[in-house]
Amino acid sequence: MIWRKRIRTFWILLSNGTILFFAVRLLLAYGADTASEARVDRILGVILSLWCLVGITAEVLHHYWAKRINIALPVSIAVFMLSTVAWLPAVSTDGDRFDAALAFAFFAIVPSCIALLNYSAYRLPGSPDSERDRSMSGI
């Protein structure tokens, strides 16, 4: 049973570490053209970096809310990426804004898959979390 926790912890560290890598790139405002774009990138980078670090810490310390954080993080990123289809063409004046919005919508598949794999990691057969979830599902 301890190997299941280690596999889950390894996967959560890997998935949150991947998100943290890109969050730090946002934090550094890599590729921002204007000052306002850099400011938005830094704000998003701080929020995502802190969320990743809280999720990693919660998983390592085995807090009961780690599952919620580590599944909600990639889901919220996917929702934000999908929402760019609605607001990016309205706020941008670039000629490729529609292509960029569609690319964001397509690449939202990646955080969606990470969320699904995080959920699966918490549902490993025989792990304490999955047994508790199954026992409470009949309520």
Image (cartoon, rainbow, N blue to C red):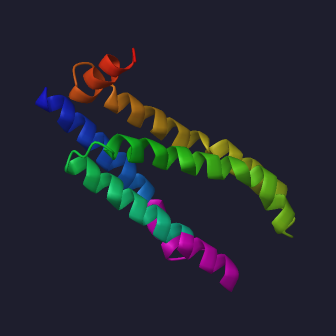
Q: Is residue 57 visible?
A: yes
Q: Which quadrant does the C terminus fall into?
A: top left
In this view, the residue farthest toward the left is 2
Q: Horizontally, is 107 left or right of 24 in the view?
A: right
Q: Is 18 located above or below residue 34 in the figure?
A: above
User: How many labels, in total?
Assistant: 0
Q: Nearer the viewer, residue 89 or 54?
A: 54
* Residue under the image location 73 percent in, 54 percent down: 84
Name the residue located 65 percent from the left edge and 51 percent from the top edge. 81
Residue with the most extreme bottom position: 35
Question: Going 59% across and 72% down the picture, which residue do you hit?
Answer: 41
Q: Main secondary structure of the magenta part?
A: helix
Q: x and y percent of residue 80 in the render? A: 64, 52
Does residue 97 appear to the left or right of 103 in the view shown? right
Q: Is residue 74 magenta?
A: no
Range of residues picked out in magenta: 21-43
* 124 lies above or below 76: above
Reply above or below: 32 against 134: below
Return the residue nearer the eye: 21 or 52.
Answer: 52
Q: Is residue 25 visible?
A: no
Residue 79: % across, % down: 63, 46
In percent of width and height, residue 70 lies at 39, 45
Instruction: Tell whether position 42 is magenta.
Output: yes
- Left or right of 49? Residue 43 is right
**Residue at 38% of width from left, 51% of height from top?**
16
Residue 43 lies left or right of residue 11; in this view the side is right
User: Which x, y percent locates residue 138?
Assistant: 39, 14
**Location of the N terminus (image quadrant):** top left
Q: Image quadrant of residue 98? A: bottom right
